[in-house]
Image (cartoon, rainbow, N blue to C red):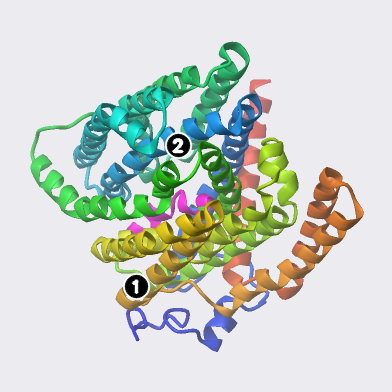
Amino acid sequence: MPSGDGSSDSDAGDWDPAADAADAGDVGATHAEPADPAEARLADALERVAHGAVVSVPSILLQQALTVAFAATLTNAFAAGPYGLFVLARRIARFLRGVAGGFGSGLSRFLPNAADDAERDAVATVAVVLLVGVTAVLGAALALAAPAIAGFTGRGSRFVLYLRVFGAGLPLTTSLFAVAGIMRAAEEVAALNVLQRVAFPLVQLAVGAAGALVFADLFPVAVGVTVGVGVVAGAGAVWLARARGFRPRFRGAGTAAVARRYVRFSLPLFLGAIATTTQRLGFYPLIAVFLSDAAGGVFAVGVLVGGLVRLPLIGVNQFIPPVAAALHEAGHRESLSRLYHVTSRLVLVGVAALSVPAVVYREALMALFGPTFVRYAPLLPGFVLAQFLACAAGSVGILLTMTDHQRALLVVNTAITLFLAVTAVPLVVEFGLPGLVASYLLMLGVNNGLEVAVLYRVEGLQPFTRAHLRPLAAAVPFAAIALAARAALPRFPGAVVGTAVGLAGYVVVLRALGFSPAERRLLGTLVERYRLALAAVRERVADAV
């Protein structure tokens, strides 16, 4: 089997005791600058990725909190059935947006390596035109087909209205994600977080509150969310033009070559996005055909709550695409392999810590959305386990793309989509909503396992070392403490106390098991970076006073 680039990297390819000793042992490393060039590259890459995650996580937490608040506002103001109908229409539109999203993947691949501003502007222009143009066509098709979709699924005229609003708003929604993609590729951490993680969720929550309290109707919410996303996207585009000098570039020397290269790279990703989006959002058409509106609402809430454990991977993935692309472009495969190992371990530490309380206190979590949803709390562990399996693979899909194996990713996603089609329909027909959750779990687990196998086959990269067992071991006492608190205390106090005490025990066990030198060095570097940044802020404040 392949083992990377044949370099001296002992942490690439197969599991190796030497790798665990070098990269995952409890050695008294400091954050001094490493002398080895490969270690120096790894330290720089880790710092860039981790800084993006550290800065992004608070805003991602805020985004998740605002998204949960938006959903809770609607589920408590309206019955599960009307909310489910609203969510169903919105997810069908999101399905089409996801299909077009493959054309945005080239931003992180090509923007960091652009030779000059002209090439940078050409790459951004091609990406935006493709994204918005394709979603405009798909959105128009959805709006025109809305009556036929409603008739086929047995939904009424309100469903037609929702589909038309979300279909017409698809180009606006996609423009926000295009602007965010440019910011991510340019490593504009603060601007990206303000735009995507704070501004839009705040607008969405305000619209939801107005729909619930003022209009007592979900249709104004659909219209308001669509308009709001366009306003936020426009503000982001203006910021890019003023702060970074981005300009539309349709003509000029080399523009046609840039467009051809971008399309060649992203076309397989666009085709693969059809399969990927079918995996992620294809459950909603199944709900539309086989299940009730209320089941759609329950499934959407389960995906939302289960997705909260994905937070560490979302943070790491904010800026690993441009970092991985740069390492691959420069041929530093040893550093890329080590980056994958360390980041996947750090992700697993966070995901395990979030998964335990989500499973143990599932009734308390589902109660936030109303009594109807508490009845379905036994299904929540399925959503959490699905996300845990997905996060255990780390940034596998991104690495396949950034190492120019998008065609392999297309094959994987197509195979998984066919597998899902064969298994999901019988499970849903036979078992209803529990069968749908089982399909969701099966899809994420098989998909990420196959992607890891393919990445190892084509690049010799895989995420696992023995150190990955440490957060799993630390989660055992965490779960025991959480279960004890659940048995001894009422629902919400038990959740708070059990999570706090269990998390403290989790940290103690992790510290006892030890961290790797790279992780210790990363922590020291980040602490020093933020100490200096805080000192500079204090100095500016003192000068101003």
- Residue 24 against residue 149 in the figure, above or below: below
Q: Is residue 248 visible?
A: yes
- Residue 323 against residue 538 in the figure, above or below: below
Which secondary structure type mostly characterizes the magenta part of the structure?
helix
Q: Nearer the viewer, residue 544 or 231?
A: 231
Magenta span has 328? Answer: no
The earlier-in-sequence mark between 1 and 2 is: 2
Q: Nearer the viewer, residue 436 or 501?
A: 436
Residue type at mark 1 is: Val
Magenta span has 317? Answer: yes
Whether residue 384 sits left or right of residue 127 in the image: it is right
Mark 2 lies on residue? 88
How far apart in space, not on screen, are marks 1 and 2 (Cα)?
A: 33 Å
Q: Position of residue 56 (x, y in %)?
A: 54, 43
What is the crowding at mark 2: few (fewer than 14 residues within 10 Å), some, or many (at least 20)?
Answer: many
Per the image, label 1 sits on a secondary structure element best described as: helix
Residue ID at (82%, 54%): 498
Query: Can you tell which quarter of the image residue 164 is in?
Result: top left
Q: Position of residue 75 (x, y in %)?
A: 62, 31
Query: Can you tell which quarter of the image residue 232 is in?
Result: top left
Residue type at mark 2 is: Leu
Residue ID at (24%, 32%): 141
Query: Can you tell which quarter of the image residue 186 is in?
Result: top left
Which residues make up the magenta segment?
314-326
Q: Position of residue 272 (x, y in %)?
A: 28, 55
Mark 1 lies on residue? 454
